[in-house]
Amino acid sequence: MSNTPNLALPLLETSQAQKEVTHNEALALLDVLVQARVIDAVTAAPPGAPTQGQAWIVGPAATDAWAGHDGELAVWLGGQWVFPEPQEGWRVYNEDDGSWWSFVGAAWSADLGAWQIPALNLDWIGLGGAWQNPRYRKTRDGLVTIEGAMQNGVAANDGVIFTLLAGFRPEADLIFIGYSAGGAYRINVQADGDVEVSGSNMLFSSFSGIQFYAAP
């Protein structure tokens, strides 16, 4: 039986019997792969009671019916597991953590990296309450975002507040303007990873709005 080149959907053959079987199989695969979503991207063993159309990205060292299908999509269709082979550029929504995952370079990975939570210096702590504490992350194409706010119960201590991990640092020193309880203040993001502030306010000082590309 022939298949389409991109999604490997089964094609009807001339004089084929039971054409509806092939046609319905193609529709079922389309229903899964178009606007695709998966339950999660880490499970390595088949769940006990999947429902029609549910899909997973198969985790490493897969077992049982998923053995040998690491990194593929596992889809429950018609009472059996089907394993569409992912192609470069495929993208799915991961219901487990609300992130988008892409298949690039023969592997799945999240489009947005995990948030990094830095340790703060100079008696600064996260603002807390309903407010986001300082954190940062990087997209697949290298765009770094820093966000969150901090407070200081001792004084408005200026200086290096935290240091970005390697791979999250700009190619050259950068200057940003942040907002604090006292108005605008200066934030330096340096090529060595140091995040330094000047003119901060102890009640609150925010990092939100900082974005730059990491050095290649």
Image: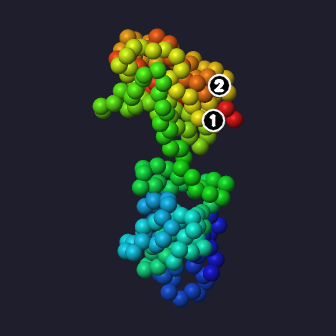
> Where does the image place residue 49, in percent across and percent down from the top left?
37, 74
Above or below 15: residue 72 = above
Q: Residue at x 48, y 32 (%)?
A: 119
Residue identified by numbered label 1: 166
Dividing the image into 4 quarters, which one contains the C terminus?
A: top right
Which residue is at the far left?
129
Label 1 Cα crowd, 10 Å radius (few <14 / some 14-19 / many 20+): few
Q: Is residue 48 left or right of residue 45?
A: left
Label 2 Cα crowd, 10 Å radius (few <14 / some 14-19 / many 20+): some
Q: Residue at x 38, y 20 (%)?
A: 152
> Where does the image place residue 62, in percent across and percent down from the top left?
55, 70
> Where does the image place residue 193, in percent across and percent down from the top left?
60, 28
Label disc, if present, on residue 80 of the rendered structure: none
Which is more N-terminal, label 2 or label 1?
A: 1
> Where does the image place residue 133, in percent across and percent down from the top left?
40, 31
Q: Residue at x 57, y 79 (%)?
A: 12
Label disc, if present, on residue 191 of the rendered structure: 2
Name the element at disc 2: loop
Name the element at disc 1: loop
Picture quadrant of residue 31: bottom left
Above or below 194: residue 49 = below
Instruction: Give, as a three-letter code, the residue at label 1.
Output: Ala
**Distance of label 1 from label 2 (alpha carbons):** 10 Å
Instruction: Give, as a three-letter code, the residue at label 2.
Output: Ala
- Residue 185 visible in image: no
